[in-house]
Every structure is written in C-alpha cells, then in structure tokens.
Image: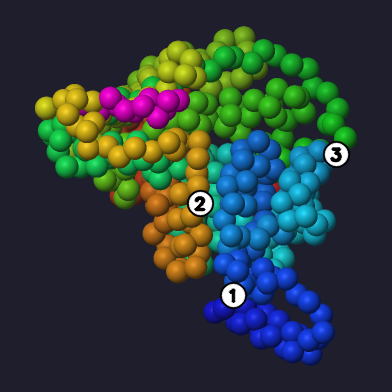
Amino acid sequence: MLKSTRRQFLRSAAGLAAAVAAPYVVPASVLGADGAVAPSNRIAMGLMGAGGRGSDVCSHFMRQPDVQWRAVCDVRQERLSTGKAMVDRTYSNGDCSTHVDFREMFGRKDLDAVLIATGMHWHVLASIYAAKAGKDVYCEKPTSLTIGEGRAMVETMKRYGTIYQAGHQRRSTDSFRFMAEVVRKGLIGKLQSIFMLVWEDGPIGPEAPRPVPTGFDYDLWLGWTPWHPYTNARVAGRTLFWDTGAGNMVDMGCHWTDMAQFVHQSDDTVPVNYEGEAVFPTGAFSETPVKGEWRATYADGVKLIMRQKGGFEDRLIRCEGTEGWIQVVDGTNGVTAQPASILKMRGISAKGWGDPGDHVRNFLEAVKSRNPMTTAHPESAHRATSMAHAANIALRLGRKLKFDPKTEHFIGDPEADRMIHRPLRAPWHL
C-alpha cells in the first residue's frame, strides 16, 4: 500500500508540474510516451555487491524498461566506483548514489528492491535486513551459509510479504526446463537417480597476514563471521573457507541440487539419507573438499549422486529412469537423451544458463503482482541449499546421516545437529 501511494503521488505531482510549467518541453520518454515507462512506474533498485557477478546480473536488469537503478553499495571503493560508473553510463547522468554500508542504502525510501550479489556469508543476513526495510529481494546463490539461517530467511520473507527470487537461473533456462518436462512426463520411465558433476577445487597455500588495502572495509566484509587477520587469499578464495563458504559442493552444487528438486518436484522437502567421501586439503590454508562424492536418497527411493571431479568444463546433470535418460551439459547448454527421439520435442533456443534475462523478468513481474511464488522462491531456494549443506556435514563428519525434512534436524546425531546453526559475531544477529 505504501508503494502504491507513493507512486500515485508522484504521478499526480508530475501532472501538476506539467500544467503549471507548460512552456517547458519535456521529453516524451520521461512522461511514459512512445512506449517508454514513466519513472513513477519503474521499479527503483539498488545493488549490493558490485563485483563481477553483481555487475553482470545488474546489466540484465538494466535491459528491462521498467527498472531504474538508483544506488550501488560495496565495501571496496574500486568496485563502488565501477558500479556507479556502469549505472551512470546507462542513464547518461551522474545520479547513482554510492554506499559502503548496506544498511544506509536499504534505509532509502526511494528504493523498491535490491539485488544482493555479495559473498554467500552475507546472503541471508542482507536479505533479512532488506525485507525489514520494505525492499523486495533478488539474491544470488548460494542462498545461505547454514541450514538454520536459511530457514530464518524463509520465515522472514513470509512475515514481511517480501518478493524474493534466488539466483537459480537454470530454472528459467530452456535446456533445464526441457529436462524437467521430460522426466515429469515419464518419457524416460520412472525416475531412479540423478547424477551431478562439479569441478575440483585447488587448495590455497598458506599466506601471511598483511595490512587491509586502502578503501576496503574488511570488518564489514567479514560481517557476522569470525574475525581473521586480512589476507588476499581469504577474501579472493572465500568459498574455500568454512567461515565464509562451503566449497564447490555447495557453491556450484546448489545449482544442481536445485535442478534435482525442480525435476523431482520436491521444493518443500529434501532427501532423508546422506553419505559420502571427500578429500580435504592437507597443509593448506583453505579448508573445504578438493574432490569427493556424496550420495543421498529421497523418501521415495530416488537417489542423488554428486561428484566433485575434473575441470570447470565437465559440469553436467543427468537423470536416469527405468526406460532411458536425459543429460544437460552446463557449458554448452547441450542436451542428449536416450531414446534419442525425445530430443525432437525440444524447442530451439540460443539462451544458456549465462543469460538470466527470463529469471530477472519473472522477479519483476512478481514485484508488480505481489505474487510470492517466483520461479526460485524462498522455500525452494532454501531446500536446494540446505540439502547441499546436509551432504557437506556428512562429508565433514565422515559418517552416514539421517535427516528429517519436516523438523530440519539430523536424527540421532547431536554433533551433526549442532552444525545446523552458527553463532554470529557481535553486533550482528538474525
């Protein structure tokens, strides 16, 4: 109601100003003519995290005529300057404001939504702060750093009526949607297993602490996670340290577990059994698995296998049924299947996973309609990520685990259960 009232006021004010200042010439695009969207009807947005991924996704938002970027936030001054320049260049002005502290940006009354593209350790807390500030959220993956904070995110989005879209853009990509349709229609028979392949992580060697670079708010970058002396490796390789990441089994793996959920139509649950083996780095600075494999089973018996092996170009997902299989290779967007006749049903599309345009559009339409069931809504995003976290916990403990999807607790294993949550460094809290 507050958003509608503000826009109605702006439209009325624009009309009054035009009547009083009749001699002045106002471009038709500003008033919404010639097919353009008037500023009062655009979704005003701010970017938190102006690194490579944030800038890329932001550029897709910029292609939408009903979006207006007004602010950029980053703890690194060089990225802040780059982000502002990108926005200003798009609108041919210097109006984009900059903020180091995201709370300052979220507090602005002229923003409707935010894009969060920070490291994964900030995804949940930033999303919760945004929701409490009345902002809708498009958040990059992985959704959370722990199972417990992921659940807190879901409940907060419900409580505040926040429109939320996770950056699981493969749900909006033709090849993966086709795979899901093939499985759901039973064209490979009854689904039996889903195989997922991600690439190996190279260990990061020890590195001595050094001064924090000028223009970098390192304490704010760490946020709620434990304090560590600054090193380039800890920041650049943040996904390979348990305090700020969870390794490739989660960082890329959450895309595959999300697709497994999508194919299996299990957005409100997760597998119940987890086991696996992993090779952890020795004598290294980094901590997460270098390579390995985990296996999980849904309550209906469908099996999941994720293997961390090989290079970046090897990533794929394969669904096997009683009468055939279908596979998508991520790098090429190529689909193969058996029987091969299945492929004749696929439409032709040049879009691969790297183009999140349709995913962005789905979010924007949800912001307008206030329909919380986006393509990658909070519950689906949380479940996909929590499954990967559960598998990671089994790997870290080196034993089989049973998980209750309803209570989101491990059964009969207090040590595993304690890993569902982590304490937050003061003054941060969920």
- Between marks 3 and 2, how big is the CA–CA gap? 31 Å
Q: Residue furthest top?
A: 283
* Type of amino acid at the residue the image marks with label 1: Lys
Measuring from the top left, give residue 388's x and y in whole percent: 41, 34
Name the residue rendered at 72%, 65% in the picture: 108
Asked if the magenta segment contains residue 328, the reply would be yes
Crowd rating for badge 3 (residues with CA inside 10 Å; few <14, some 14–19, many 20+)? few
Q: Which residue is mark 2?
A: 360
Comes first in the chain, label 2 or label 1: 1
Looking at numbered disc 3 in the image, what kind of residue is underneath it?
A: Gly
Say if 347 sits above or below 134 in the image: above
Q: Is residue 270 left or right of residue 357?
A: left
Main secondary structure type of the part rendered in magenta? strand
> Closer to us: mark 3 or mark 2?
2
Closest to the observer, 167 or 64: 64
Circle 1 crowding by C-alpha within 10 Å: few under 14, some 14–19, many from 20: few
Quick check: 350 left or right of 34?
Answer: left
Quarter containing the C terminus = bottom right
Q: Nearer the viewer, mark 1 or mark 3?
A: 1
Residue 154 pos. (x, y %): 45, 55
Residue 88 seen in this snapshot: yes
Residue at image mark 3: 215
Task: Please report contact status of discs 1 and 3: CB closer than 8 Å, yes or no.
Answer: no
The figure's colour scheme reads rainbow
* Label 3 vs 2, first from the N-terminus: 3
Residue 72 in the magenta stretch? The answer is: no
Reading the image, the residue beneath label 1 is 3
In the image, which residues are magenta?
A: 325-336
Residue at 42% x, 25% y: name it. 332
- What kind of residue is marked 2? Val
- Dot 3 falls on a residue whose secondary structure is loop
Residue sitting at 45 percent across and 25 percent down?
331
